[in-house]
Image: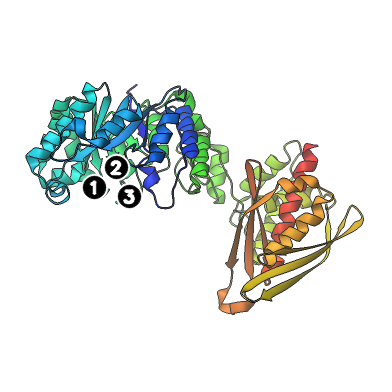
Amino acid sequence: MKMVEILDSTLRDGAQGIGISYSVEDKLQVVKLLDELGVQLIEAGHPASNPKELAFFEKANRLRLRTAELSAFGSTRRKGCLAEDDHALRALLHAGTRWCTIFGKSWKLHVDKVLETTCGENLLMIEDSVRFLKQNGRMVIYDAEHFFDGYRADPEYAIMTLKAAEAGGADTICLCDTNGGSFQQTVLPAVDRMLREIHVPLGVHFHNDGGMAVANSIESVLRGAVQVQGTLLGFGERCGNANLSTIIPGLQVKNGYHCIPEEKVKALTRISRAVAEITNISVAHGMPYIGKNAFAHKAGMHADGVIKLPSSFEHIDPACVGNTRRFPTSEISGKSIILEKIRQLFPNRSIKLQDVTEVLAEIKRLELIGYQFEGADASFELMVRKKMEPFEPFFKLIYYHIGTDLMGDYIGASATVKLEVKKQIQLMAAEGNGPVHALDTALRKALEVFFPTLSEVKLTDYKVRVLDSKNATASRVRVLITSKHGQSSYTTVGVSGDVVAASWKALEDSMEYFLLGQTERT
């Protein structure tokens, strides 16, 4: 099995993505997760950039990592000075990592217009910097910045920059597509030639501005590159970096390369989503391998095929990357999908064809008036349970009243809710930032008197969609509410011509779904 070294730059290149800002503690958590995944190298930051980075390296070097090593990132020395006098190179040594990654210029355009120096001085800057770090006991990865653009402009000079890094003693030379616009017809011939002319291991580092980062990375490895750099979820500056959560299974599961320990591949989905949580971003539902919809089958024909033979509509077993198969529920769902979902809810019950037919008919009736269940599995489950195995409602609404408060520039809302709970009448009022927030707060306060564990449920997302905008303010709306309890989340749906009434239905389902689950677990 061919080995491929994975260098994860989530904490360096990824941190340059818009809206991403890691604290020192965030970075330490991500390091632990990447180490658990089994990547070999973690490019953890630029120690010369700010004091926070140095503080991170001081703490990170005390971590007991099992598989990964940290690499500090920086640039070649400044023009016109000695490597030993360059503060950025000295900061790399001070970071205390065994590995260092430094970048230098491969493109004459940058030498002339950005560095404003000569081509000869640039070569010396590269060689001197690599040699300085090697003489101080470091393993060195040389990132050839803008290599593919430089190679297109002047291939011989671009190669000379790599030769300079090789002469300085670089342990790995990485070909970078820094602008992210290179396509395979440029990349692959250049990679082939460098594999012949450079005698140290070659890596690749692609940005995704042309949408080619994953493809270019995988094809480069198939040609002979032995290191891939990227970020775990593909985020980074501008359009992002090569997505390692796609590249790792693409190489290991699909092409037989060894990127991470075999037993760790099953942790890919869990760890990727954990890193997303720390980063405060959402994993795109359609992201290959790890996305929520990566193995979702909505069309009845597709679902029927997967149930009979998974490989008929799935390129890999979702379990091998730690993901799961999903059958979103909608009006185009076939009976096979509905039967499978009912079986999951009632595994010990014999399901009749009539049950499936009635549930499917109810889905079509509700979707005709605006409901959508493919993104609201909790409401779907409640609907099925009420049809298949009716239960006593945990509460009944007697009425709610909403008021809007306008005081100067402040606009708020108040809500009063009257419920019947356990044969008792409960009246509760609350204020909020808006009518739905006030209603949610009043409902929770009323129910928590009887069900204290509801305080653990948090509303995490609220979406409203106008269904028939041609009717203007008389339009029907669909409300989706996502709630979270511990590490699990679920979504409910409500539809009405009144946004508050639609919100109430989604809130009601959210509370009822949680309470039903609590009852079944006790």
**Cα distance in 3D space between marks 1 and 2:** 9 Å
Going from N to C along the chain, the mark reached first, 2 or 3, is 2
Quarter of the image where the C terminus is located: top right
Residue at the image position 45 percent from the left and 38 percent from the top: 315
Residue 272 vs 337, above or below: the answer is: above
Residue labelled with disc 1: 182
Between 229 and 388, the one lying in front of the other is 229
Q: Residues within 10 Å of mark 3 (few under 14, many from 20)?
A: some
Residue at the image position 58 percent from the left and 78 percent from the top: 472
Residue at the image position 35 percent from the left and 51 percent from the top: 239
Q: Element at badge 2?
A: strand
Q: Element at badge 1?
A: loop
Asked which quadrant contains residue 223, the reply is: top left
| The label number, if any, that marks residue 7 in the structure image | none
Residue labelled with disc 3: 211
Quarter of the image where the N terminus is located: top left
Q: Element at badge 3?
A: loop
Residue 293 makes an appearance in the image: yes
Foreground: disc 1 or disc 2: 2
Would residue 409 be found to the left or right of residue 518 on screen? left
Query: What residue type is disc 3 on?
Result: Gly
Residue 3 is situated, as x and y percent measured from the top left of the image, at 33, 24
Residue 135 is situated, as x and y percent measured from the top left of the image, at 21, 22
Between 495 and 245, the one lying in front of the other is 245
